[in-house]
Amino acid sequence: ILYVGHSTFILDDKKGTRMLIDPWLKNNPACPDNLQNPKDIDYILITHGHFDHIGDIFEACDNNKNAQVITSLEISTWLNNKGVSNTLPMGIGGTQPINNNIRVTMVNAVHTSGIADDTSDAMIYGGIANGYIIKFENGFTIYFAGDTAVFSDMKLIGEIYSPDLSVLPIGNHFTMGPLEASHATKLLGTKNVIPFHYGTFPVLVGTPEEYIELVKDLDVNVYVMNPGDVL
């Protein structure tokens, strides 16, 4: 798991499949220079349409001609209309298999998904925001929450998918903050967490230190990653 910065990650299953999550690269102030043009990407997963999650989708697709984009039907249709045809649209609750017996499931998120399109003065409807469950061939399962508030169905996500690792936003203001993320951790029953979506902008005031303090009695391993770190 390579943390690119803000909400962008690259996953490598070490068997030849590389996944890029929410490509915001060149205009991402947290993204190191050497990670702004990732190559050899097989799949690009999009959680929603906000600029800090899809800001470099077209360049990422140009640099990875064979990459397939996994996203909602609405964002897929928008991308198709922009010339990106290699999409694998799906809906919340659905699962699709990809390379090396990896299974990708789209799950709920509580957030919005408007797209700021240069051709429109208004936000374009981008469906609803989502998270992903990624289950690898060996059974290891990651829950990428995407941008979200805490919601009670996280308990169902924990019961159904039993994520070994959860990637949770903690920045506050636009997503849940450390307090809400600590409740999300309880609902999920997860024992390993990567916090993300904090500190990139001044309003994202939630900190890993706050979150760690709030989950100190939950027997949770918290992996605080800096951009460029690999776990």
Image (cartoon, grey):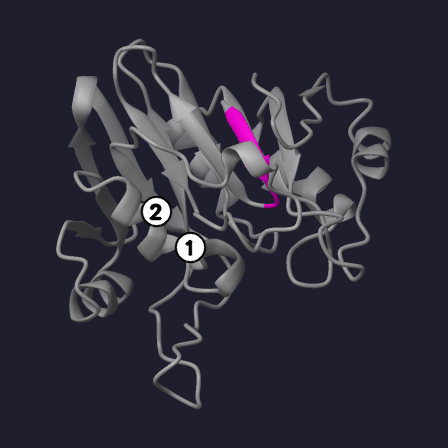
97 on left or right of 175:
left
Q: State which quadrant residue 100 falls in.
A: top left
Task: Examine the rendered structure and indicate whether residue 133 appears above or below residue 190.
Answer: below
Residue 3 within the segment the image draws in magenta: yes
Question: Residue 117, position in %: x, y?
Answer: 39, 77
Closer to the camera, 152 or 59?
A: 59
Answer above or below: position of 76 versus 221.
below
* Amino acid type, label 2: Ala
View extreme (bottom): residue: 121
SS state under label 1: loop
Highlighted range, magenta: 2-6
Q: Which mark is residue 220?
A: none
- Residue at the disc numbered 1: 56
Left or right: where 188 falls relative to 160: right
Q: Position of residue 127 (x, y in %)?
A: 33, 68
- For label 2, the residue is 60
Which residue occupies the extreme left position in the image? Answer: 85
Judged by its main secondary structure, the magenta piece is strand
Q: CA distance from mark 1 to mark 2?
A: 6 Å
Residue 210 colored in magenta in the image: no
Taking the image as drawn, is residue 190 in sight?
A: yes
Q: Secondary structure at mark 2?
A: helix
Q: Measured from the top left, where is residue 128 in percent x and y?
A: 38, 65
In the shown orientation, is residue 33 left or right of residue 138? right
**What residue is drawn where x is 17% and y is 71%?**
81
Mark 1 and mark 2 in contact? Answer it, CB < 8 Å: yes
